[in-house]
Image: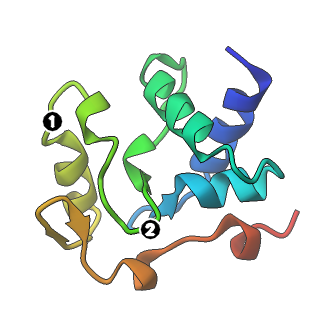
Amino acid sequence: MSDFFSKVFEVVKLIPPGRVTSYGAIANYLGTTGSARMVGWAMNASHSHHEFVPAHRVVNRNGLLTGKHHFDNPNAMNELLENEGLVLEGDQIVNFQERFWDPMKELNF
């Protein structure tokens, strides 16, 4: 596993339940703007990580659940987010901006 993936996992573990962030926001926080796709690859690899990584809390910049097909059950991501109080219409988070967690603003270290 790459050092980049490890850094992504550490950020994702800090996302509070009921909040979501985007692949790009994580890439930006890590100083690798433009590597949102690599963050997505890390989320796909997180399912085999030795610690729980709440990958369901990472969506695309529009609040779409683009990574849902990488879960064992294609409805798992929707269900996990709904269990945390998020409202979805199809595969998109309603009130995405209100639920958005920006690591650049939330993490002060």
Q: Work out whether mark 2 precedes mark 1 in sequence or the reverse, and give the earlier one.
A: 2
Q: Does 18 sit above or below residue 49?
A: below
Residue lying at 51% horizontally and 62% vertically, measured from the top left:
21
Q: Residue 66, percent across and down?
A: 32, 47
Mark 2 Cα shell of 10 Å, populated few (<14), some (14-19), many (≥20): some
Question: In the displayed structure, does residue 77 sit left or right of residue 2?
Answer: left
Mark 1 Cα shell of 10 Å, populated few (<14), some (14-19), many (≥20): few
Secondary structure under the numbered disc 1 in the rendered image: loop
What colouring does the structure picture have? rainbow
CB-based contact (under 8 Å), mark 2 and mark 1: no
Looking at this view, name the residue that lies furthest to the right.
Answer: 109
Q: Which mark is residue 105?
A: none
Work out whether residue 50 or residue 37 is closer to the camera in this orientation and state it: 37
Structural distance between the alpha carbons of marks 2 and 1: 20 Å
Name the amino acid type tagged 2: Arg
Looking at this view, name the residue that lies furthest to the front.
Answer: 34
- Mark 2 sits on what residue? 19
Q: Residue 109, percent across and down?
A: 88, 62
| Badge nearest the viewer, 2 or 1 | 1
Name the amino acid type tagged 1: Pro
Question: In the displayed structure, does residue 12 sit left or right of residue 95?
Answer: right
- Mark 1 sits on what residue? 74
Secondary structure under the numbered disc 2 in the rendered image: loop
Q: Quadrant of the N terminus?
A: top right
Residue lying at 27% horizontally and 58% vertically, measured from the top left:
81
- Count of numbered labels shown in the rendering: 2
Residue lying at 70% horizontally and 73% vertically, measured from the top left:
106
